[in-house]
Image (cartoon, rainbow, N blue to C red):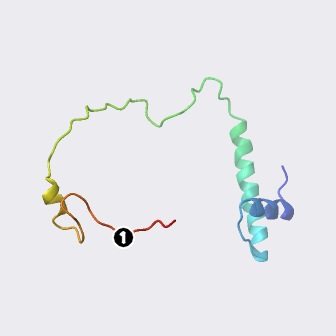
Amino acid sequence: MKIDRDTVLKVADLARIAIKEEEIEQNVTEMTKILTFMEKLNELDTTEVEPLVYMNVEENRWREDVVKHEITTKAGLENAALHNESYFMVPKILEK
């Protein structure tokens, strides 16, 4: 694929990126380099390569969820600026 001025401007428009006039030629060069690299990658034989979903093959070892009461409600509310006996009080941010 040939990258030219119009292609750069179209990609910039689709990506909602403002490009200055003096940056267009630099972007043509950079996009051409990227496409050349992608063409080299397409030449590789990947028939025996397994698809990569995760970077490592190990599975997560999940721990059991255990309910612990490590802090009391009173202790949790001690440093709150505004609170009642059970809840933090915060400014209203949603309006109707």
Q: Residue at x 74, y 49 (%)?
A: 36
Identify residue type, mark 1. Pro
Q: Within 10 Å of the Cα at label 1, are there few (<14), some (14-19), or many (20+) other Cα atoms?
A: few
Estimate the x, y position of residue 38 in percent, counting from the top left. Answer: 71, 45
Q: Residue furthest top?
A: 48
Report the side of 56 relative to 96 (left or right): left
**In percent of the image, x 21 and y 64: which residue is there?**
84
Q: Determine which residue is flagged by label 1.
A: 91
Q: Is residue 63 above or below residue 91?
A: above
Nearest the viewer among 73 and 59 is 73
Quadrant in the rendering for residue 11? bottom right
Q: Position of residue 96 (x, y in %)?
A: 52, 65
Between 17 and 22, the one lying in front of the other is 17
Q: Is residue 71 above or below residue 81?
A: above
Residue 80 image point, x, y percent: 22, 67
What residue lies at 81% left-to-right and 61% top-to-bottom?
A: 10
Q: At 18% across and 59% down in the image, what residue appears?
A: 76
- SS for tag 1? loop
Q: Position of residue 89 (x, y in %)?
A: 29, 66
